[in-house]
Amino acid sequence: MILQSLLAVVTAYLTGMLYYGIYRNITARFHKRIGPPVTQNIYDSFKLLFKKESTSYGWIFYMGPIVMATASILTLLFIPLFNDGEMEGVSRYGDLFVVLYLMAMGPLGNALAVGISANPFGAMGIGRGLTRMAGLELPFYLSLMALVYFSGSSDITQIMSAQEDMPNMMRYPLLFTASMISLTGFLGKSPFDVVGAPVEVYSGPASEFGGKFLGLLMSQSAIFTFAKLLLMVDLFWGGAGSLAELLLKSFILFIITVFIGIVYGRFKVHQAVDFLIKIPSAIAVAGILLHL
Amino acid sequence: MTYTLLPLFSALLILSIPRRWTALSSLLLSLAPPLALLIFGAPSFTFHPSAQGLEWVAFGMQNSGLSTLMGWLVALSAPLLLVTALKAESRKRFHFYFHALNSSLYTLIFAADTLLFFTGWEMMGIFSYLLLSLSGRMEAKVLLRYILFAIASALSLLGGLVLMAKHSPSTLFSDIASTLGASSSAQSGSLAAIALLLFFAFAVKAGSIGLHYWVADSYEKADDLFSAWLSAVVGKASIYAMILFFIFVLSIHENRALAELFSYLLMLVGLSTSIFATIKAAVQESPKRLLAYSSIAQVGYIVTAIGLMNSVGIAGALYHAIIHTMVKLLLFINVAGVISATGRDSFRSLGALAYRMPFSFISLLIAIIALAGIPPIGGFSSKFLIYGAMIEGGHPILLSAMMFASASAFIYCYKLIFGIYLGARPQEMREDIREVSAHYLIPQYIIVAALVILGLLPSLPMTLLDTILSGSVSGLPAEESLFSLSNGVGRYEGGVLMAAFIVVFASILAAMVSLPGKSRKINDPSNIAYCGERPESSLHYGASFASELVRIPLFGAIIRTRVATIYEGLSSLLASLSGIVRMLYRIELPSILLIATISLALLLWGGAG
């Protein structure tokens, strides 16, 4: 079980990093740049992890990225990797409610670390991040809870196995659309992204994560990205029977969010939340009412 | 009557004890009810006076599972609070009223008839009022508001109980249940009237939307320890009463005509309360006021779960009541510690205490994780049950709205910890602030241990909850082991999750520590990048955190809503009506003419009739 879990983490790390590399390349082409090699993020994360020194605000600051990475890895481990029971690890105990709440643990860890740095702009960023998260979650929950209701189970394996005849994305297209809009935001893509530290924190006490902390945050971000895509593949696309199938399906979902992100500009947070609790939520409610 | 008399006796005894021993004797006396519960169990008797013309009068105490659970909740919480009181509260009057209040709580919890229940309910209101009045911060208008709402609740309850008595051979719950509980459709009208009157009475105490006007000010202005008791324990009386009357006495869930309507009423009131109070909590500027709104929101979840009227829903409601009692006791004691250590009670003047008060910081962190319902801490288990019950009841949309409220709660949870423990130190705050004494920490860490145990063994209370519900609502899903919890649509493996969390966290921590890079701690808080501008005031953002929510139209509408406007409107309407009535008894020419005209009209109308 431990070996399977480790393999899942490595797979998620490499895939997430490569996807992010591809995303950077695609974005660069749209900007008429060449962009970095697709493996650049892997080099970067290792380089950062082995930096000689990183600034810290004590043990709370130290714990933030660790809690975030723990949450990302736990989220991944409790989502089934394949639909045939291979490499299941602890995912046999995976329940959708548990996974959804584990997804919320990471931001809280990050928020603690940012908070202790005492930078008011960092706290503003956290406030915006948490507000945006609440907005993203309404359509996401509506779609996913509808799936649980229609499948009669919150066991992810059961939801996955109930799609042998037809994947949920075809059976419930409106729910899929609403959840894809949320996924775009969850993956940090425009128009629902929140500005990161380099732009936001222009004054006040130094608060940025550096060195091994940044390395860990980059790594966990890759794992978390893959975990979210995996969840969508399992819930709406019947899961995958092989690694190739999983990579293909998750990549297609990923690339959809990438193109949405490239095409749209960024909403302000209040605009994003207002949009999310209206349009995608209405789409999801329509999707539910259509099948009740 | 043991559990009514024991605390009452304790209260009287405290009056005769020297002041320096008051808090200690109060703590020791508070151990009597849990010991009595442990040794003798809950009371059970009925008494018919059989006086001429009063055959319908009967008194009694019951030892039902529900009463026993709530009794234990009060009995175990009281000593925890009084450990803190050893340091924080030595006034005789506080301890006298506190034990007298507990006497009233035991009375209503163990009552087997409407008369004792009502007596307990009234005593609860009166002693809560007296305890509120002890606070140095209290304002007359807040007290007046509290007592007005308490009277409204009591009158509505009395109305419901009188209607019940009309249809029942006696005042005993068992007799009421046998006549009204198995109600035919012909009696649905009176049953609906009773249920609505009772619901109003309990909703006032639960602080449901629109009726919450008294809550925030009372919690904020009360003495810190009494705020804890109000939120954690006294607030649960309404939950107990709802489950007792709606499920066990009136069996509304079995009444075809009423069940669905009443179910939706409870769920919609509960949900809208949760969403409203969650958003309100996020913009409060004092920790106690934030926690007051949080309490309103959490009780909203419980009301929603009761509204489901299925076994998992009721079990989830009770489970959440247990968790909420623990969490709010912890949070209010924590905040009381912070206020006592700093002398400040606003986010504007608090901040950056994490390294000065690390034990308090950690306990608050665990409490907000439980409050937010994040696994593997106990708070997730109750939400897991409620969510499963909502799917089972066929309410995926309402469930999503509830989860949205729950996700929005992260904002105020973070504001609480950020505003007090993180961020920058306000300039006016002393530098010599140190960790609070063990009196504050011991109760907190007992609760932390209980929350962690409930996370590891989520189905620990399920046997008790199953016993409570068996016979009234269909059975709960079977549990495979103490480490897992089933909600009818899924299974939460608390043991596996806790183990996985520990392994993953420890592995990452070990890897980070073993990496060659060193972390350099920045000790200088004035290490500021000015970027061309020098901040003139504190950089702490605690009070303003989440103020941007007002820009979101829906959130802004909720934040700007002042329920006071409704009551002020009602008040001015009543004042105008009073003005008209006043005209009738003033000895002035217009009044005399008015009375004469009305009398003449009545005489003519009577004559014509």
Image (spheres, rainbow, N blue to C red):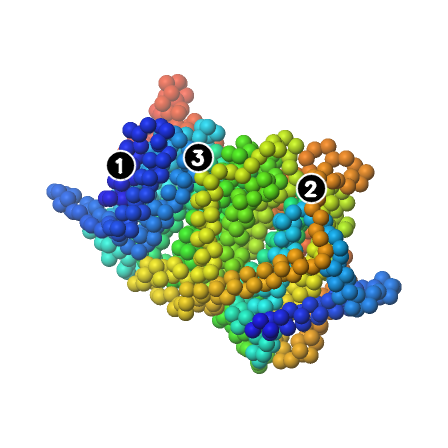
Identify the mark at residue A73; answer none if there is no mark.
Answer: none
Q: Is residue A137 left or right of residue B155?
A: right
Identify the mark at residue B87; answer none if there is no mark.
Answer: 3
Task: Mark 2 and mark 3 in contact? Answer it, CB < 8 Å.
Answer: no
Q: Nearer the viewer, residue B240 or A221?
A: A221
The residue positioned 60% from the left and 74% from the top of the image is A4
Secondary structure, mark 3, is helix
Task: Mark 1 and mark 2 in contact? Answer it, CB < 8 Å.
Answer: no
CA gap between label 2 and label 3 equals: 33 Å
Q: Is residue B472 above or below residue B567?
A: below
Q: Is residue B274 above or below residue B132?
A: below
Report the residue marked by disc 1.
Answer: B9
Q: Is residue B570 above or below residue A138?
A: above
- Say which quarter of the image contains residue B175: bottom left
Q: Chain of mark 1?
A: B
Q: What percent of the width, then of the height, locates residue B402? A: 52, 56
CA gap between label 1 and label 3 equals: 23 Å
Question: Is circle 1 on the same chain as circle 2?
Answer: yes
Question: Is circle 1 on the same chain as circle 3?
Answer: yes
